[in-house]
Image (cartoon, rainbow, N blue to C red):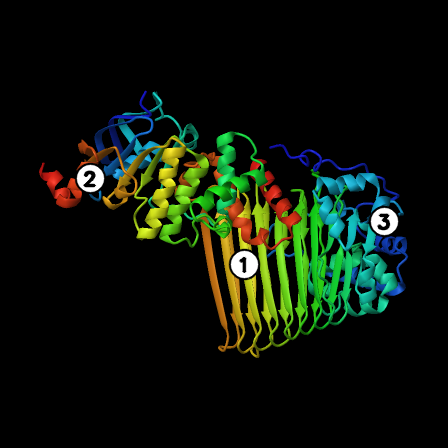
C-alpha cells in the first residue's frame, strides 16, 4: 500500500515569513516579541520576570540527557504573513496542503465546530461556530485572548496552575510563549463536539512555545484535541509547550493529543490540570517522533471526589528517548486516579515511564491505580519503569502493575498460519497493543495514530 | 496426484524425538481421522505440517501437490492452501476477529480487499454458523469460551477456504450443541468448497458428525493401524490398549 502522505510530510512547505527572529535569547528579543504582538504592558512584565527566573534555574539533570540543547542556536519567535483568516476558503493554499498531508479528513472538517490551526508560531485561522458564541464559549488563539479577555488571562495564565517558577522550561516558556489556544466554557455548558487544533513547526532550529489555557467552569464539559507533526531537519529544535487546565466543581475535561515532532526535536512540556470537587480530568496521549521527549501530564486533585484518568502510548524508535509518564497528587478525600501507560521500543529506542502518585494526609478514601505495559520489539531497545508512590494516609489505596513484553512467538505462529507475513503479523500485534488508546480517539485521529505507527514500524 | 504426502517423517522438539518415521497420504476430497492416546505425537504432526519453527524435521518429507514444503515458512504454507485449526487458539488483544480476517484475506489474495464487500461476505459466513455480528468485533479469542474459540477457528477456515485443513481436537471442550455447530461448519466446507481434511481427535464422538473415509491410529510417533470408519468404532469399544497390544 502506498501512502499519499509519505514524502510530502517530510518536506517543508514554502516559507513566507514577514519577520524572522534571530537565534538565541536576550531581553531585547523578548521586548521585540511582545512588541510584534502589540501586547499590553502587564504581559511584557510577565515575560521579563519569567526570563529572569529562567536564567536562575539550571537545566534539569534527573531525566534524559539535555546537554546538547543549545539555547543560543534556537530561534525563539517567528511570525507568518500578517494575515488572519476567518473562513476556511481564505486559508493559504500551502497551509491547506500541509494539513492535507497530515490527513485531516474532509468529512471531519465539516464537523469541526471551531478550528485554530497554528502555522509557525501564530494562529492564522480561527473559526468558531455561532451557536457556541451564544452560549458564551470562547475558543480562540492565545494571542487574541490576551487582548480580548485580559481579566481571564490575568487570573489564570501561569499563576496557580503552572507558574514560571515551576521549572526551567516553564520559565523559558513564560518568556517567549507564542500562539496556542484559549478555551473558556461557562458554567453548565456542555461542548459536545471536540475542539481541535493542529500545530506544525516549519523552520530550522525554531522553538515552538505554544500556550494552551482551558477553563471549564462548574458542571461544564469539553474535549480539546491537539495534534502535531513536523518536517524533518538535522539541526536540533525545541518544543516546549505549557498546558493549563482548570476543571471546576463537577466539570469534565478531556485533553487528547497526538504528537509527532521530527526526531531532531526536543519535546519538553509542562501540562497540568487543577481538578476541583467531583471534577473529572482525562488525558489521552500518543507520543511519536521527537529525539528527546519529557512529558508527564499532571493532575492535581484538590477537591473532594475529583478524578483523573491518564492514558498514554509512547513509541521510541532509533535514537529516540521517550521519558513520559504522569503525575497525580490526590489532595482531598475520595479522590481517585487511574494511569495507564503503554510504550513500544524498537531499533535501540529507549522508553521510560516516570510517574508520581502522591496521596496527602487528608486524602482519606483516595484510590489510585497505575498500569505500565511495555512492548520491546528487539534486544537493542530498552525499557525502564520509575514509579514513585508517596502515601501519607493509611486510609487510601494504591495499586501498581508493570509488564514488559516481547512479541510472542506462539502468537506470531498463529497469525502466520492464516497466511499473514511475519512483518504484518508483528504490525497486527503492535496495533492491538495500542488499540486501547486508539479507541479513545476520534475516528480520524485513530486512523492517523495507526498510520503513524505503521510508518514508524517501516522506517528504521 | 495426492494433495498431501508425508513420507518417513521424523520430528524433534528441543532434541526430543516425537515422530519416528510416519507415512500418510491424503488425496483430494478425502476425510482422514487421526486418533491416538495422549503424547502419541498427533499435535506435533499438525505443527510440523504447518511449519512451526520449534518443530524440527530431521528426516523424511512433507509434500503438498507434489512439491516439498519443508523449506517454506508458515505463512507461505498457509497461502498454498493449508489450514491448521488449533487445539488452543492464541489470544491477540486489541485485534478484532474481522480486522484479522480481512488482513489474512488480503494476504491470501495479495491485494487490498474492499472493506464493505468483505464485511458482507463475512456476515454471511458467520450467520451460517449462528455466529452473531458482535462476535466479529471482539478481540481475537480474548475472553472467548472454549466453544467460541473453536467456532472462530472454523469461521476463519470458512473465510480462507483452504484446500487442506488439519483440525487439532476441534471437538475438545465442546458440549453437544457447540459440537454440532462446529461439525456443520466443517461439513459445509467439505461439500461446498471441496475441502480435504485431517481430523485429529481423541474421541469417536466427533466422527459421528464428520464421517471420515479413513481412520489412522497413532502410537509412539507412528501410525500403527489404518482402516475405515469401523476402526474408530472398534477403538471406541476396546480402547487404545487394544492397539498397543496388537
Of the pair B183 and A446, the residue shown nearer to us: B183
Determine the CA span between mark 3 and mark 2: 78 Å
Left or right position of B191 against B38? right
Q: Position of residue B67 (x, y in %)?
A: 35, 21
Callout 3: few (<14), some (14-19), or many (20+) C-alpha neighbours within 10 Å? few
In the depicted structure, whether residue A60 falls above or below residue A390 = above
Same chain assignment for discs 1 and 3: yes
Secondary structure of residue under mark 1: strand
Callout 1: few (<14), some (14-19), or many (20+) C-alpha neighbours within 10 Å? many
Q: Subunit of mark 2?
A: B
The residue tagged 2 is B232
Callout 2: few (<14), some (14-19), or many (20+) C-alpha neighbours within 10 Å? many
The residue tagged 1 is A340
Determine the CA span between mark 1 and mark 3: 39 Å
Quadrant of residue A356 within the rendered picture:
bottom right
Q: Position of residue A389 (x, y in %)?
A: 52, 67
Q: Are marks 1 and 3 in contact (CB under 8 Å)?
A: no
Amino acid at each position: 500500500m502506498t501512502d499519499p502522505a509519505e514524502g510530502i510530510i517530510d518536506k517543508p512547505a514554502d516559507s513566507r515569513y514577514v519577520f524572522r527572529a534571530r537565534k538565541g535569547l536576550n531581553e531585547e528579543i523578548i521586548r521585540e516579541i511582545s512588541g510584534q504582538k502589540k501586547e499590553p504592558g502587564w504581559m511584557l512584565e510577565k515575560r521579563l520576570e519569567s526570563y529572569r527566573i529562567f536564567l536562575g534555574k539550571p537545566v534539569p539533570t534527573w531525566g534524559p540527557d539535555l546537554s546538547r540543547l543549545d539555547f543560543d542556536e534556537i530561534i525563539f519567535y517567528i511570525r507568518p504573513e500578517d494575515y488572519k483568516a476567518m473562513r476556511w476558503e481564505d486559508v493559504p493554499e500551502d497551509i491547506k496542503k500541509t494539513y492535507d498531508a497530515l490527513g485531516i479528513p474532509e468529512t471531519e472538517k465539516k464537523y469541526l465546530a471551531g478550528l485554530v490551526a497554528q502555522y509557525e508560531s501564530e494562529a492564522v485561522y480561527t473559526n468558531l461556530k455561532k451557536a457556541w458564541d451564544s452560549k458564551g464559549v470562547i475558543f480562540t488563539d492565545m494571542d487574541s485572548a490576551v487582548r480580548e479577555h485580559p481579566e481571564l488571562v490575568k487570573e489564570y495564565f501561569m499563576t496557580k496552575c503552572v507558574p514560571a517558577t515551576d521549572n526551567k522550561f516553564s520559565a523559558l516558556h513564560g518568556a517567549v510563549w507564542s500562539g496556542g489556544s484559549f478555551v473558556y466554557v461557562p458554567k453548565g455548558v456542555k461542548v459536545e463536539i471536540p475542539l481541535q487544533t493542529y500545530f506544525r513547526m516549519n523552520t530550522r532550529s525554531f522553538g515552538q512555545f505554544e500556550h494552551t489555557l482551558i477553563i471549564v467552569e462548574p458542571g461544564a464539559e469539553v474535549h480539546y484535541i491537539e495534534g502535531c507533526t513536523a518536517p524533518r531537519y538535522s539541526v536540533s529544535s525545541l518544543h516546549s509547550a505549557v498546558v493549563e487546565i482548570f476543571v471546576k466543581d463537577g466539570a469534565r475535561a478531556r485533553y487528547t493529543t497526538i504528537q509527532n515532532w521530527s526526531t531532531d526535536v526536543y519535546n519538553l512540556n509542562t501540562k497540568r490540570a487543577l481538578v476541583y470537587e467531583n471534577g473529572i480530568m482525562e488525558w489521552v496521549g500518543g507520543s511519536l517522533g521527537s529525539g528527546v521527549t519529557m512529558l508527564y501530564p499532571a493532575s492535581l486533585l484538590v477537591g473532594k471526589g475529583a478524578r483523573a484518568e491518564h492514558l498514554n502510548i509512547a513509541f521510541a524508535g532509533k535514537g529516540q528517548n521517550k521519558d513520559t509518564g504522569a503525575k497525580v497528587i490526590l489532595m482531598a478525600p475520595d479522590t481517585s486516579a487511574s494511569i495507564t501507560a503503554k510504550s513500544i521500543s524498537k531499533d535501540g529506542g529507549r522508553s521510560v515511564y516516570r510517574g508520581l502518585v502522591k496521596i496527602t494526609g487528608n486524602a482519606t478514601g483516595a484510590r489510585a491505580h497505575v498500569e505500565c505495559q511495555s512492548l520491546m520489539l528487539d534486544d537493542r531497545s530498552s525499557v525502564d519503569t520509575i514509579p514513585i508512590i508517596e502515601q501519607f494516609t493509611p486510609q487510601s489505596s494504591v495499586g501498581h502493575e508493570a509488564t514488559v513484553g516481547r512479541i510472542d512467538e506462539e502468537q506470531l505462529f498463529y497469525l502466520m498460519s492464516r497466511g499473514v507475513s511475519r512483518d504484518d503479523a508483528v504490525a497486527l500485534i503492535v496495533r492491538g497493543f495500542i488499540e486501547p488508546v486508539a479507541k479513545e480517539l476520534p475516528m480520524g485521529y485513530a486512523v492517523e495514530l495507526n498510520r503513524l505507527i505503521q510508518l514508524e514500524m517501516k522506517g528504521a | 496426484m495426492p494433495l498431501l504426502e508425508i513420507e518417513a517423517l521424523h520430528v524433534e522438539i528441543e532434541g526430543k524425538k516425537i515422530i519416528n518415521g510416519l507415512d500418510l497420504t491424503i488425496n483430494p476430497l478425502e476425510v482422514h481421522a487421526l486418533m491416538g492416546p495422549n503424547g502419541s505425537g498427533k499435535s506435533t504432526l499438525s505443527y510440523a505440517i504447518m511449519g512451526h519453527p520449534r518443530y524440527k524435521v530431521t528426516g523424511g518429507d512433507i509434500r503438498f501437490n507434489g512439491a516439498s514444503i519443508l523449506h517454506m515458512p508458515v505463512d507461505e504454507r498457509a497461502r498454498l492452501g493449508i489450514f491448521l485449526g488449533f487445539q488452543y487458539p492464541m489470544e491477540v488483544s486489541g485485534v478484532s476477529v474481522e480486522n484479522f480476517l480481512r488482513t489474512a484475506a488480503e494476504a491470501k489474495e495479495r491485494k487490498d480487499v474492499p472493506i464493505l464487500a468483505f464485511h458482507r461476505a463475512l456476515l454471511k459466513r458467520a450467520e451460517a454458523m449462528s455466529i452473531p455480528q458482535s462476535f466479529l468485533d471482539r478481540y481475537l479469542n480474548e475472553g472467548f469460551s472454549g466453544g467460541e474459540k473453536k467456532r472462530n477457528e472454523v469461521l476463519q477456515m470458512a473465510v480462507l477456504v483452504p484446500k487442506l485443513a488439519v483440525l487439532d481436537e476441534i471437538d475438545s471442550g465442546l458440549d453437544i450443541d457447540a459440537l454440532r455447530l462446529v461439525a456443520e461448519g466443517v461439513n459445509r466446507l467439505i461439500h461446498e468448497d471441496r475441502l480435504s481434511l485431517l481430523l485429529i481427535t481423541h474421541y469417536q464422538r466427533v466422527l459421528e458428525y464428520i464421517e471420515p473415509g479413513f481412520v489412522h491410529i497413532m502410537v509412539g510417533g507412528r501410525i500403527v493401524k489404518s482402516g475405515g470408519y469401523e476402526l474408530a468404532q472398534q477403538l471406541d469399544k476396546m480402547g487404545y490398549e487394544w492397539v498397543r497390544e496388537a
